[in-house]
């Protein structure tokens, strides 16, 4: 009877060891797959892989291609680059409206403001810089809304 208990004990221990071994093998496979996925992601971030290699799949979804990186925006090819220095040189000590500053800048670079898209683009750029200049106290302003004038 003691021999039977020992045999049952060994059998139970053997089953337990086999189960632990199987679980460990499954864990090794899981972690190898995880390492492969993370390595691919890391390489993708460093630009080593091509777009064809960057296929990711979420559980329960169809495989999707990773989004390609978007390039830098080119802006309006008709217009020159307008930085802070460009706009600042058109602001004088005499108070001027947005339209006066815009007309002076357009005249300098030879842009015709009859094209609505060009005029809107330049006005938006100017408005951004005027707000920033006023916020950092590079220039002053007086008036409100359409009556607003800007000066040094």
Image (cartoon, rainbow, N blue to C red):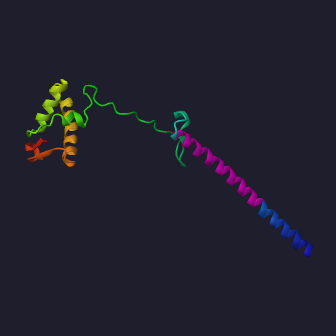
> In front: 152, or 64?
152
One can see residue 107 in this view = yes
* Residue 100 image position (x, y, % from top left): 10, 34
28 within the magenta span: yes
Using the image, determine if residue 57 lies above or below residue 121. Answer: below
**Residue in the picture at 78% in, 59% down:** 18
Q: Is residue 22 found inside the magenta-colored segment of the image?
A: yes
Q: In which quarter of the image is residue 128?
A: top left
Asked which quadrant contains residue 13, the reply is: bottom right
Q: Pinpoint residue 39: horizontal percent, then vertical percent.
A: 59, 43
Residue 60, x across and y down, in percent: 54, 48
Q: In this view, does 33 lie to the left or right of 62?
A: right
Nearest the viewer among 142 and 48 is 142
Q: Give the quadrant of the C terminus.
A: top left
Q: Where 13 sits versus 45, above or below?
A: below
The residue closer to the viewer here, 5 or 96, is 96
Residue located at (78% from left, 62% from top): 17
Numbered-mark total: 0
- In-front residue for pair 3/132: 132
**Quarter-wise, where is residue 130 in the image?**
top left
| Image: magenta residue range | 18-44
Residue sitting farthest toward the bottom: 1
Instruction: Return the x and y of residue 136 as percentages of the image width and height.
Output: 22, 48
Report the magenta stretch's main SS.
helix
């Amino acid at each position: 009877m003691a021999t039977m208990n020992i045999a049952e004990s060994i059998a139970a221990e053997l089953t337990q060891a086999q189960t632990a071994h199987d679980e460990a093998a499954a864990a090794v496979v899981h972690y190898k797959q995880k390492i492969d996925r993370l390595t691919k992601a890391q390489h993708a971030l460093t630009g080593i892989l091509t777009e064809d290699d960057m296929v990711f799949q979420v559980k329960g979804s169809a495989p999707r291609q990773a989004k390609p990186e978007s390039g830098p925006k080119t802006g309006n090819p008709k217009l020159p680059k307008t930085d802070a220095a460009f706009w600042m040189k058109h602001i004088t000590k005499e108070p001027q409206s947005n339209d006066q500053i815009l007309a002076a800048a357009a005249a300098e670079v030879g842009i015709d403001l009859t094209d609505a898209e060009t005029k809107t683009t330049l006005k938006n750029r100017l408005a951004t810089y005027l707000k920033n200049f006023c916020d950092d106290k590079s220039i002053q302003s007086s008036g409100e809304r359409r009556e607003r004038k800007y000066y040094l």
